[in-house]
Image (spheres, rainbow, N blue to C red):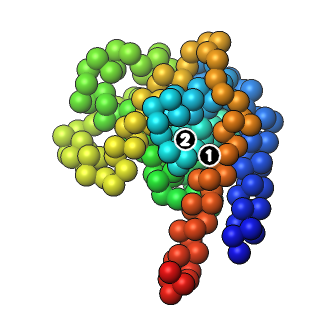
Amino acid sequence: MASDQHADATAIASQIIQMFRQKGDAAYVGEEVTQTEHALQAATAAERDGADCELIAAALLHDVGHLLHNFPEDCAESGIDDQHQVLGEAFLKKHFSSRVTEPVRLHVAAKRYLCSSNPAYWDRLSAASKTSLELQGGVMTDEEIVQYEAGQFAREATQLRGWDDEAKVVGFETKNWEHFRQPLIAALELAGDQASDIRHPSDK
Ligand code: FE
């Protein structure tokens, strides 16, 4: 029932927000902002650019994988790739559509793609992002570029990457969790609608 779906979406949104409230004050690997500040800045940028609820959710949660592992903050400097995009996708997949989870999974690939196609982009990356780039595979080969561009969510992932990169500004004023609770719930409900369409195709 739709009201059950709304209750489920509301509960999941609360759990996710709670997780950021508990763990999101940790520093963001090598950056000057916390995970929570980074998430809220990325979502604020997405909303400013007219993104819909799913892409706002993707921006908000693109680094949730950093909250799900126990590697030290500076693990990239010790040569460890935390694979946070894979952890994040696996976590989000339980609740969100692929329009949310695929850009999240691809936001590291998007960095590699943008470095390959635009040398000025590499120059603008933060020092921490340049360090992790090497662990993540470095710039893309021509073959990888073709494969990335052919992906269904390449455009969204590239857009998400832009919001990610600009979301590292100390003291930047953003909307808060309460503001983003609504698009988060809307994105969760859309995923619920899609799941029920698959389960009950004849109802439509
Ligand atoms: Fe990020």
| In the image: residue 110, left or right of residue 20 | left
Among the two numbered marks 1 and 2 on one chain, the one whose residue lies closer to the N terminus: 2
Residue at 34% across / 46% down in the picture? 154
Answer above or below: position of 2 versus 132.
below
Residue 29 in view, yes or no: yes
Task: Identify the image quadrant of residue 57.
Answer: top right
The location of residue 29, given as percent across then percent down, is: 60, 24
The one nearer the camera, 142 or 47, is: 47
Q: CA distance from mark 1 to mark 2?
A: 7 Å
The location of residue 47, given as percent across then percent down, is: 53, 34
Q: Which mark is residue 183?
A: 1
The one nearer the camera, 174 or 20, is: 174
Q: Judging from the image, what secondary structure is the residue with disc 2 in?
A: helix
Task: Identify the image quadrant of residue 120.
Answer: top left
The location of residue 155, given as percent across then percent down, is: 34, 43
Residue at 51% across / 77% down in the picture? 198
Which residue carries the number 2 mark? 56
Amino acid marked by disc 2: Ile
Q: Quadrant of the N terminus?
A: bottom right
Residue 93 in view, yes or no: no
Amino acid marked by disc 1: Pro
Q: Local crowd at mark 1 within 10 Å, few (<14), some, or many (≥20)?
A: some
Answer above or below: position of 199 versus 170.
below
Answer above or below: position of 167 versus 188.
above
Residue at 29% across / 46% down in the picture? 148
Q: Residue furthest bottom?
A: 202
